[in-house]
Image: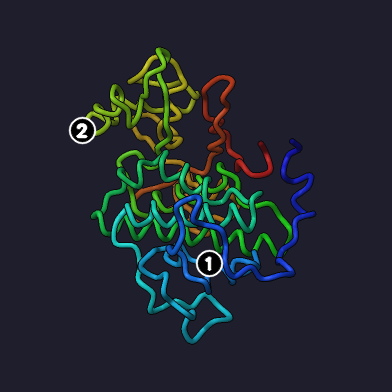
Amino acid sequence: MLERKKWWSNLPVKHTHTYRRLPLEHGGAANKVSDVVVIRYHDRSFPLKIKMFLPANRTKKSFGTSDSKEGTADWEGAKGAQDVREALLNLADVLAELWPYDNTARILQRVLHNVNYGAALRCSDQEKVRHMVEFCDGVLRENACRAVEQETNLSFRQAKERWADIAERVGSSSNYIHQATDQSGGQAIGGQRGGRAAHSGRGREAMGTVNSSGNNSGGFRGGAAARGRAARLQQGNVSYAVCFNYNRGNCGRTLKGVGCDDGRGGTFAHVCNHFDVSNSKYCLQQHPRDGNH
């Protein structure tokens, strides 16, 4: 029951024996994942792609011309959100047999569930699927690199930040959606009560904003609902979205005003986006989250 960082380094990076046939029938994943994918996943340091777990690619016998890398250029990709969901279920079943302590599939599912599978992204449905695949592939690739260093796989919060980076780049009506609840226990976002307002053009008022003093304005009762959107810095009549890359310590954009140029004529604020659950407020101080919280 210890935290993962206490024992994760004891996990092997690669199985010494190759199990070509996994007992996947019990979980409903029989004949849905290619044998070459199963064999590759015996080594956690190999980067994988979410399309490798699509049933449409179950008959593939090789990864193409670049087996030592990611390959699979000619493999069929996800066409809709349902494909992404099924691929994640198949990934979860394979992990349960090969690496039962690795909860990457569940974390990916939870993040996508919390953002309603990209519903708030300002793009077409096809592009939303592409961004979901980009998110999953990025987390899988990063976890493969972390396996080499014997570091724990990305946590839910860290994976959620990877999605936030995509939402920031693409643009969304709420940038960073969480499942929030109001004081009466009903869902504030995406649910029967609060979600209706968010999807009817009144989402900004329903979700509220966080000003520079950390107070929640507008929308739901109490400060907890403020976490339903990205941190914002309010200065006078201008509200600035907080720069996620600054809070990860790697913002390379041109400095501008209170932070950096967002590439579209606007500005991201360089302030801390740490959310304190004890008082339901964002920090919004002039320091990055990493290294300070």
* Residue 231: % across, % down: 46, 35
**Three-letter amino acid code of the residue under disc 2:** Gly
| Residue at x 42% of width, y 14% of height | 183
* Residue 17: % across, % down: 71, 70
Q: Taking 228 as reference, is 10 left or right? A: right
Viewer-nearest residue: 241 or 230: 230
**Three-letter amino acid code of the residue under disc 1:** Leu
| Residue at x 48% of width, y 62% of height | 137
10 Å neighbourhood of mark 1: few (<14), some, or many (≥20)?
Answer: many
Residue at numbered disc 1:
48
Q: Taking 153 as reference, is 136 left or right? A: left
- The total number of labels drawn is 2
Q: Is residue 239 above or below residue 153?
A: above
Q: Quadrant of the N terminus?
A: top right
Viewer-nearest residue: 256 or 47: 47
Viewer-nearest residue: 90 or 260: 90
* Residue 171: % across, % down: 33, 49
Applied colour scheme:
rainbow
Residue at numbered disc 2:
201
In three-dimensional space, the C-alpha distance between marks 1 and 2, rounded to whole angstroms, equals: 38 Å
Q: Is residue 242 above or below residue 125?
A: above
10 Å neighbourhood of mark 2: few (<14), some, or many (≥20)?
Answer: few
Q: Quadrant of the C terminus?
A: top right
Q: Is residue 7 above or below residue 221?
A: below
Q: Taking 281 as reference, is 75 left or right? A: left
Q: Is residue 121 above or below residue 239?
A: below
**Most extreme residue toward the left, as rendered?**
200
Q: Taking 267 as reference, is 2 left or right? A: right
**Label 2: element kind:** helix
- Look at discs 1 and 2 and give the one toward the viewer: 1
